[in-house]
Amino acid sequence: MSYIEVERATKEFVHDKTPFTAFENISLTIERGEFVCILGASGCGKSTLLNALAGFSPVTRGRVTIDGREVVEPSTKYVTIFQNYGLLPWRNVQKNVELGLENRKLTRDERREIASKYIDLVGLSAFKRSYPRQLSGGMQQRVAIARALAVDPEILFMDEPFGALDAITRSKLQDDVRALSQIERKTVVFVTHDITEAVYLADKIVVLTPNPGRVKAIVPVPLQGPRDRVSHEFLEFQNRIFDLFHRAPDELVEYMI
Amino acid sequence: MKKTLRGVRNVVVSFALLIILWQAVFSVSHFSEALFPSPTTAFKALLETIQDGTLVGNIAASLKRFAIGYASAVVVAVILGLILGVLPRVFQFVNPIVQLLRPISPMAWAPFIVLWVGIGDAPATVVVFIAAFFPVLLSTVSAVVNIDPIYFKVARNFGVKQPYALWKIIFPAAFPQIANGIHLALGTAWVFLAAGEMNGVQSGLGYMVVDARNNLRTDVLLAAIITIGALGLALDGALKFVDKRILNTWGGVEN
Ligand SMILES: Nc1ncnc2c1ncn2[C@@H]1O[C@H](COP(=O)(O)OP(=O)(O)OP(=O)(O)O)[C@@H](O)[C@H]1O
Ligand SMILES: [Mg+2]
């Protein structure tokens, strides 16, 4: 039995009395420690699927289990990181990171110490007293990551976490997230519509197609060791994923020849 | 600093213009000094009431009633508004009652208020309470309803449970809009304070107006009116300052 199991899961919304299927009959499994990317075009139900996995909005049919238990509500065991960060603007960095620790039996100093450790880990030691609005988008997302790691979750759910960032910041954060997930031994479910991002990060890619969202393919990423975004193997594999969407980009064909 | 200086300058210029206009209208009008006092007469009356201590006494009485009525209305309305905001099913039933009571002028209750709470400080305080209560309540409920859902998601995810979520998440998230309502209510409540003091009390700025009328002292009447306006303006400025300080420390807004 796998760590996360999604069995014939369907999510229907009822809008003005007409049902709308966001995704249908999705089945997949994720192992402990795996880095899985859910890849698909806008509107194919990626966020909806992630919300179902994270317990925010359970599926209407089928089953989602984590560690053998059905997911019915959110838990600090699996923390979600959102595209727009979800930081509390009235709390400074330190206090934001402490949020998930406040309902635990910890003293103030213990809380502070744990939060500091993760703020240091994401490289923001100098900004503990800053408020989110004083930070760049990339720094804010680092705070969100520190806040998530601070509660020591088993799983990180990430919903296009770098979608709003520039390419340079994004690739830096991709490196960081991959490194952190390995150091901290987290299972990561990462939603993106960026094929390169998925190929760079994932151990396994779940490709979704829209209307309604369905699994098109589940592809293990065969790349070993540190990945190089311009290596031959990388581009070749990336192209295979492109092909899955029936649109091989012209610029990549040149590399292939 | 430059900005405040410019602000002060604007206020001074605008008030000077008003006084000049007032004097001009007085000079060309045919009213007697007793019906339409000139700026000088009004200013003399103001000095007179300051010197004999009545003005300060009345201001103190008014401010005390206002502070108690307004502060308690804000506290009660914000707490109730936060609760009703997170319980939309309850608010469904409360809302029609609020909408029914809200358009009733607090002054319409005045006779009952005197019967129920007696005379003295209480009636004007209750009038201020009613005047401030509904705008704060409604703006708090709508502020909570309009909170970005992501904050609730974050709260659920990080195990922030009620009642903690109320003051850790919901109140601060809604605060900018609540502050707006609190601010608007200040003006309304101040308007009704003077009205509320026109019955059943022997002190306060509203009483001063009525008393001046009864004594046919239109100059004192005008001095009282000017004081009401000036204090209202000052309170508004003070609240604006406090608002900004809170929003700044909470990192809610940019300057
Ligand atoms: N709460 C909801 N009620 C009704 N329909 C919804 C709801 N949430 C999502 N949907 C619909 O479900 C579909 C999938 O939405 P979803 O946000 O999961 O897509 P997505 O793959 O994450 O897209 P994007 O890449 O743009 O974020 C959309 O058509 C959307 O309108
Ligand atoms: Mg989405």
Image (spheres, coloured by chain):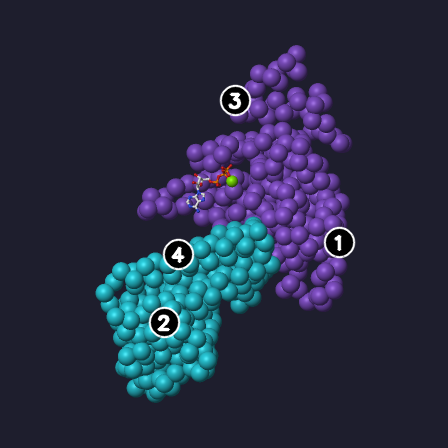
Chain colours: A purple, B cyan
| Local SS, label 1 | helix
Please state the horizontal and vertical placement of residue B136, each as a whole percent of the image: 41, 65
Please state the horizontal and vertical placement of residue B96, each as a whole percent of the image: 30, 65
The answer to whether residue A118 is above or below residue A24 is below
What's the chain of the residue with tag 4?
Answer: B
Residue B25 is at least partly visible in this image: yes
Is label 2 on the same chain as label 1? Answer: no
Indicate the amino acid at tag 4. Answer: Leu
Q: CA distance from mark 1 to mark 4?
A: 62 Å
Q: Which label sits on residue A246?
A: 3
Residue at 46% over, 80% down: B51
Front disc: 1 or 4? 4
Residue at 63% over, 25% down: A238
Would you name the residue on which mark 4 appears? B17
Would you name the residue on which mark 2 appears? B41
What's the chain of the residue with tag 2?
Answer: B
Front disc: 2 or 1? 2
The answer to whether residue B30 is above or below residue B60 is above
The answer to whether residue A182 is above or below residue B112 is above
| Local SS, label 2 | helix
Would you name the residue on which mark 1 appears? A117
